[in-house]
Image (cartoon, rainbow, N blue to C red):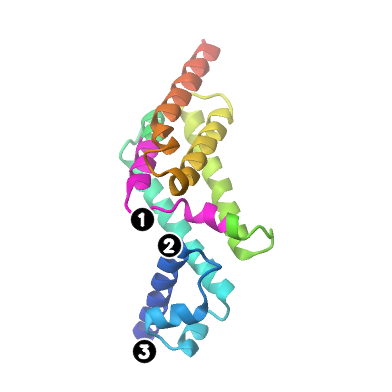
Amino acid sequence: MTAIRSSARQRILDVASNLFYREGIRSIGVDTIVEKSGVGKATLYRHFPTKDDLIAAYLKETDHLHWKWFDEVIAKHEGSPRAQLLALIEATVQIMMEPGYRGCALLNALAEFSEADHPAHRIAVEYKHALRLKLTQLSQQAGAHNEELADQLILVINGALASVPVFGSAGPAAQLKMIATHLIDHHLENGQRNHS
C-alpha cells in the first residue's frame, strides 16, 4: 500500500513539476494536475493538503536536483576550483541550449511569488543564497580575495538564465561563457597579484 501511495505522490509531483515549469505555477490549477496525473482529487489532497504544499514540494525537488547536478559537475574537476567554476558555467550553457528550456525554475517562482512569506519565495531565496555561498567558497578557493567574483558570476548567470525565454539561447545568453571566463581570469589574476 505504501508503494502505491508513494508512486501516486510521485506521479502527482512529476506532472505538477512539468506543468509548473512549462506553463507557470499560478496558471496551473489543481483540476489540471488531477486530470493529467490520473489520480483523484482526494489522493492529491492526501499527499498535498494545499496547492502551496505541492508548490513547495516541486521547488524543494528542483532545489535537490540542482544541487545534485552542481555536485556532479564540480566532482569532475576535484582539486581545481578554477576548473570547477568554468565547468559550472559550461554546464549551465548546455542546460540553456536544451529544447524547452524556460529559464531557472527558482527565478521563475520568484517572479510569480513576490510575497516574502510565501513558501515558493522562501525556497527560491534560500536556494539563491546557498548558490552565492557555494560560488563564493569556490571563488576564494581558486584565489579570489572576496565575494566580488561570486557576485558577478551570480549576476551574469541569472541574467543569462532569465534572457533565454525572451531572446532564445543564441541571444545575450550566448555570451555567458565568454563573460564568465573573463571575470574568472580577471579576479584570479588580481588575487594572485594581491598575494605577491
> Residue 51 versus residue 128: which sits nearer the camera?
51
Amino acid type, mark 3 = Met
The three-letter code of the residue at mark 2 reads Arg
Which residue is located at x 45 percent, y 28 percent?
A: 179
Q: Which residue is mark 2?
A: 22
Q: Amino acid at mark 1?
A: Gly
> Was residue 99 drawn as part of the magenta stretch in this picture?
yes
Q: Position of residue 18 (x, y in %)?
A: 40, 66
Label ID, residue 121: none
Whether residues under marks 3 and 1 lie with C-beta atoms below 8 angstroms apart, the answer is no
Left-right relation of 180 to 4? right
Residue at which label 3 appears: 1
Q: Answer yes or no: do the residues labelled 2 and 1 have beta carbons within 8 Å?
A: yes
Quadrant of the frame with the N terminus: bottom left
Rendered position, 91 above or below 147 = below
Which residue matches tag 1?
Answer: 100
- Mark 3 / mark 1, whichever is N-terminal: 3
Q: Nearer the viewer, residue 32 or 167?
A: 167
